[in-house]
Image: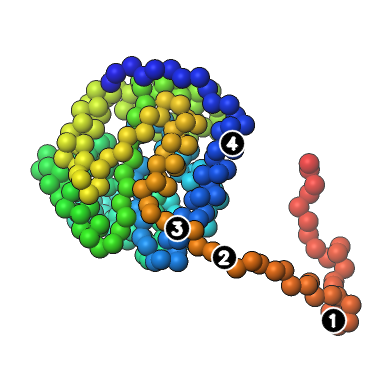
Amino acid sequence: MPKKTKQNKLDIAFYESELAKLQIKLVKLQDWVKAEGKKVVVIFEGRDAAGKGSVIKRITERLNPRFVRTVALGVPTEREKTQWYFQRYVPHLPAAGEVVLFDRSWYNRAGVERVMGFCTDEEYWEFMRSCPEFERMLIRSGIILIKYWFSISDEEQEKRFQARLKDPTKTWKLSPMDLEARTQWMAYSKAKDDMFKYTDIKEAPWWVVNADDKKRARLNCIHHLLSQIPYKEIKREKIKLPPRQAEEGSGYVRPPIDTQTFVPQVY
């Protein structure tokens, strides 16, 4: 991977201002998807500690979880291992008016399963043959499919791993698989290159996000996502709050406050 030019850190105030603007646009996108009955799938793949989760968090934090949800599947069960490979992902695809964000996806087979030997060569090559057709089928069915790969240098990944070791709120992010991946850096690089060769299709290309700078990666990814969907602002009716019903004359008497059990005010 060519060495990336180091940039100055983004001003915090500028970053927060731009993120707020983008999140307002995401709300408008959500309204349009719901009103038009669209179906959107966004795939997030990349190196461990590349910042996929933090981008997903910024996308979803202002949106309605009833219509915009994240899917992050764990290790397949013994039963799921016997299914058609894409079968465990299909139930999570969106219905009309929904957006689904895959925090890792069916591309596990082309990455971790390939490198760690969790699938056979036959299963791997069948995936490479089937995946483009599977995605074309999704697109023909009306799903808007967008795929992101988060690219991070080995120096930056090492820095983030070390930070996770020192932070008790982040050590859970270092799974045994993440640690093993450190010893397989080049194998994962080759797996990614092979994956792009077969699955970077015209109908659903891979979009690479330079993720060495977390804040820039968040802004750039969200900005690009918004540009890929031809949404329009849906005019909402102005909301007027009705007057709250008065207690007097209602005939209702509240029970004494000391009959309730309160959380201790430690702070």
Residue to which mark 2 is pinned: 236
Marks 1 and 4 sit apart, C-alpha to C-alpha, by 47 Å
Q: Secondary structure at mark 4?
A: helix
Image quadrant holding the N terminus, namely top left
Res 250 label = 1
Q: Secondary structure at mark 1?
A: loop
Image quadrant holding the C terminus, namely top right
Q: Is residue 35 left or right of residue 4?
A: right
Marks 1 and 2 sit apart, C-alpha to C-alpha, by 34 Å
Q: Give the x, y percent position of residue 93.
A: 33, 59
Judge whether 130 appears above or below 236 on screen. Answer: above
- Please tell me which residue lies in front, 208 or 245: 208
Q: Residue at x 42, y 61 (%)?
A: 33
Q: Give the x, y percent position of residue 38.
A: 37, 62
Marks 3 and 4 sit apart, C-alpha to C-alpha, by 24 Å
Task: Please tell me which of labels 4 and 2 falls first in the chain.
Answer: 4
Res 16 label = 4
Q: Is residue 200 left or right of residue 91?
A: left
Nearest to the eye among marks 1 and 2: give it: 2
Judge whether 19 appears above or below 139 on screen. Answer: above
| Mark 4 touches mark 2? (CB < 8 Å) | no
The picture quadrant where one finds residue 114 is top left
| Mark 1 touches mark 3? (CB < 8 Å) | no
Q: Give the x, y percent position of residue 193.
A: 21, 31
Task: Please tell me which of labels 1 and 4 falls first in the chain.
Answer: 4
Res 232 label = 3
Q: Amino acid at mark 4?
A: Glu
